[in-house]
Image: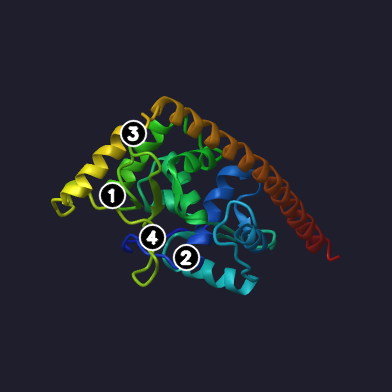
Amino acid sequence: MDEFENDDRPEVRELSSRQRRVLGVLIEKGLTTPEYYPLTLKAVMTGSNQKSNRSPVVDYDEDAIEETLDQLKDAGLVGVLHPDSGRSLRYRHYVRKRYEFSEPQIAILAELLCRGRQTLGELRGRASRMVPIENLSLLRSELNDLLTRGYIQASGSLERRGVEVDHAFYRPNENRGVMPSMPADALPASTPAPSTVASTTAAQTAAPAIDNTKVDALESQLAELRSQNQELRDEVEQLRSTIDGLQSKVDDICRDLGI
């Protein structure tokens, strides 16, 4: 039986680092390995401690994971599935019930909760393995909505090259990831000395023109290589998750047989 109370608890906007990791893992695994979802306690621990697609890498034990799941359950973000057969408890997230997010936004937040700040190219490559995000324009559209509603933060305009984004579920006493850059028109105006003006003008005259088309192409190729590398890492992690899922089923069968 799956538990969920449709209550009036306020929307959660702050999570501890451990809560963010566990919630991100539940979302990620629900999208990438639905055949093994909801997850057992052991599977949540394995997903939280995996070496790839996680930052920072952690080493939580089962007690810490169970405590965190209980905290998320109290907040209405996680539910517990009680199998009728008496097998191991399984856990699922309730993000879809507690927030108004599109499926791409859920994948985006899962990636940010598991890994933290990253560029748009990195984020699209990683989140697309959960939910298709065809191009950066679609990604920016989803991010703009999340940014407007205060669920993410950005280091500058989403149209700017190299901008980084992060979730905004930090607690007040934490490093809050990437904060919005000060807009250019907010910087104090000053008049440089004549010698500075002269040297700056000379440098600008001598500097070769930058071919933005070539830069964009190189950045696209680099993002693609990073995405391919991440896909290889994800395939290895997928195999590990599959093995963990099979082991969980074997454990349940052994328990039923009294072995």
Q: CA distance from mark 2 to mark 4?
A: 14 Å
Q: Earlier in the sequence, mark 1 or mark 4?
A: 1
Q: CA distance from mark 2 to mark 3?
A: 59 Å
Picture coordinates of residue 77, whole percent (x, y):
44, 59
Q: Earlier in the sequence, mark 2 or mark 4?
A: 2
Residue 206, disc: 3
Q: Earlier in the sequence, mark 1 or mark 2?
A: 2
Q: Earlier in the sequence, mark 1 or mark 3?
A: 1
**110 w.r.t. 139: above or below:** below
Are circles 2 and 3 on residues that touch, CB within 8 Å? Answer: no
The residue tagged 1 is 149
Q: Indicate the secondary structure of the residue bearing disc 1.
A: loop
Q: Nearer the viewer, residue 240 or 42?
A: 240
Label 4: few (<14), some (14–19) or many (≥20) C-alpha neighbours in 10 Å: many
The residue tagged 2 is 72
Q: Nearer the viewer, residue 1 or 180?
A: 180
Q: Residue at x 47, y 65 (%)?
A: 72
Residue 169, disc: 4
Q: Nearer the viewer, mark 2 or mark 3?
A: 3
What amino acid is labelled 2 in the image? Leu
What amino acid is labelled 4 in the image? Phe
Q: Earlier in the sequence, mark 2 or mark 3?
A: 2
Q: Nearer the viewer, mark 1 or mark 3?
A: 3
